[in-house]
Amino acid sequence: MRRPSGRSIAAPEETRSGPRDSDTARRLRPRDAAAIAALPDSVSAHSHQAGWYNNASFLLPFLAAVGTLIAWLVAGGAELLGISIFFFVVSGLMLPLVYLTWQRTATAIVLRESGIEARHQGRLLQSLAWNDVRALRRVETMGNVRWYVFGPEDRHLSLDGEIDSLDTLLDEICRLADVEREPGSRGA
């Protein structure tokens, strides 16, 4: 279900939600907002609401370390102190891994008249032209819902469930790329 190549993809003026005018723009990270403001043909921008510290491989051991440290201060006992130290070490060891994976996570998804872009702190990670978009698929893995915008040769952009106004973003992608969500994948 592809759009004829001569058809314009620009949204009608009354339905355009440019990032500078939307509520989402206020939630963009400063570097993302600055980079997106410099784009002449942006249609909308959607921010990633989670931060690097929301990663469970870092957060859970850190919370366990703090909890056992508090328990040690209240109740005493060398075992609680040892467990707390262990969890602090695990948290410290996870920081580089979390940092590296966070650098590859899109903090903003930008829809432009020419295509879709994934950006991290203003830096372009990936992009696809609307004519290259082939499918929009929902994938659920262990309770985590993620959407994929597929292009040619297995190129794709990943849309995490923590993206602001995800359902609106998906509707805009369908309209601009002239594709439909795969059957049974309505909603996030």
Image (cartoon, rainbow, N blue to C red):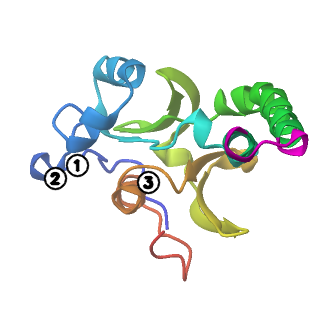
Residue most extreme to the bottom:
184
Amino acid residing under circle 3: Ala
- Residue 45 vertical position relative to residue 125 in the rendered view, above or below: below
Q: In the rendered structure, does residue 78 fall within the stretch colored magenta? A: yes
- Of circles 2 and 1, the one toward us is 2
Pointer 1 residue: 11
Q: Secondary structure at mark 2?
A: helix
Q: From the top left corner, tell me how far across and down residue 98 is, in percent.
A: 73, 33
Q: Secondary structure at mark 3?
A: helix
Pointer 3 residue: 177
Which stretch did the figure color magenta? Answer: 73-80
Q: Main secondary structure of the magenta part?
A: helix
The answer to whether mark 2 and mark 1 are in CB contact below 8 A is yes
Q: From the top left corner, tell me how far across and down residue 14 is, in percent.
A: 9, 51
For this rendering, which residue is in front, 5 or 25?
25
Amino acid residing under circle 2: Thr
Left or right of 14 on screen, residue 102: right
The answer to whether mark 2 and mark 3 are in CB contact below 8 A is no
Q: From the top left corner, tell me how far across and down residue 59 is, in percent.
A: 67, 43
Q: From the top left corner, tell me how far across and down residue 72 is, in percent.
A: 75, 41
Tell me which residue sits at (50%, 34%) in the image: 107
Amino acid residing under circle 1: Ala
Mark 3 or mark 1, earlier in chain: 1
Pointer 2 residue: 15
Q: Callout 3 environment at 10 Å: few (<14), some (14 to 19), or many (20+)?
A: many
- Residue 117 vertical position relative to residue 57 in the rendered view, above or below: above
The residues bearing labels 3 and 1 have C-alpha atoms spaced at a distance of: 12 Å
- Of circles 2 and 3, the one toward us is 2
Q: Secondary structure at mark 1?
A: loop
Q: In the rendered structure, does residue 99 fall within the stretch colored magenta? A: no
